[in-house]
Amino acid sequence: MRATWLGFMAYTRATLGANPPVLSSVAIPLESRRLGDYISWPAEALIALISAFSWLLLLTQGDAQLRWQVPVLLTYVAVGLFPGKIVVVRNSFPLPTERAEEHHRWMEAQRRWLLRWMDTVQWFLIAILGGYALRHGWPGANAIPWLRWLLVGVALAIWPIMLVVIIRDWGCLTAMGRDLRPVGSWSGPFRGIKWIQPPGYWVWFGVWFGGLVLLLAFFPH
């Protein structure tokens, strides 16, 4: 769905061409956004606790079948989404003065949709990490036949929930913004609007994705 959103924005930009409509004035949202209003600190603490406990098991009790690339990649991707959430919360766009409040509500809904998407991906990966740590870091895990299926079931249950949430909320966003100007479809009176995401997002994404590529190259199998 993230790729779909980016594709839609790219299509909008391509359709409008290199010279999007120029608005004579823009509105600047002045509200302060606290991280605690968008990010659940107890949930983030629980993710950190599960990650730390999983690594403690693997480092102290890891069995011979342990493949280190699995927990390394899972932890990197999941934990690396946290600074991305901060960037999403802090990002801000100028608004058209025409129907500014509606544009603001729509952009806030997009912000919260993206954060929910990142939350669900995090929990999916952390559930897999915790199950992997129990299986390879707890000697008694293999003696409990139903435990493996329980761990697999928990991880798999998160996946359809994630899809339902993303698809449902995406439909609501599409309906909400049907008559509004998408980001990147216009420019202000003095300079163009940085479409899709401002530089801070791309810095985080470049570092996060670049690190992932390096890890995949380091763990080729």
Image (tube, rainbow, N blue to C red):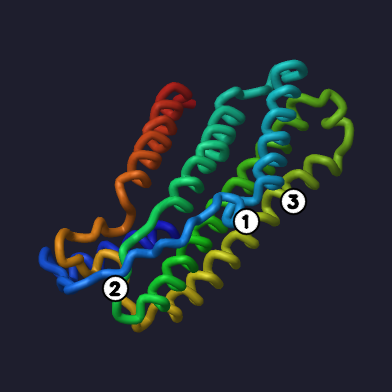
Which of the two labelled residues, at mark 2 and mark 1, occupies the earlier sequence position?
A: 2
- Does 126 sit above or below residue 139? below
> Is residue 107 toward the left or the right of residue 168 in the image?
left
For numbered disc 2, what is the local secondary structure? strand
For numbered disc 1, what is the local secondary structure? helix
Q: Disc 2 or disc 1, which is closer to the eye? A: 2
- Residue 155 versus residue 42: which sits nearer the camera? 42
**How crowded is the residue under tag 3: few (<14 C-alpha within 10 Å), some, or many (20+)?**
few
**Which residue is labeled 1 in the image?**
159
**Which residue is labeled 2 in the image?**
96
The answer to whether one can see residue 8 in this image is no
The answer to whether one can see residue 159 in this image is yes
Query: Which residue is located at x 31 percent, y 69 percent?
Result: 27
Say what amino acid the circle numbered 2 marks: Pro
Query: Which residue is located at x 51 percent, y 63 percent?
Result: 113
- Does 74 sit above or below residue 96? above
**Which residue is labeled 3 in the image?**
153
Percent coordinates x, y for residue 72 in the rendering: 56, 28
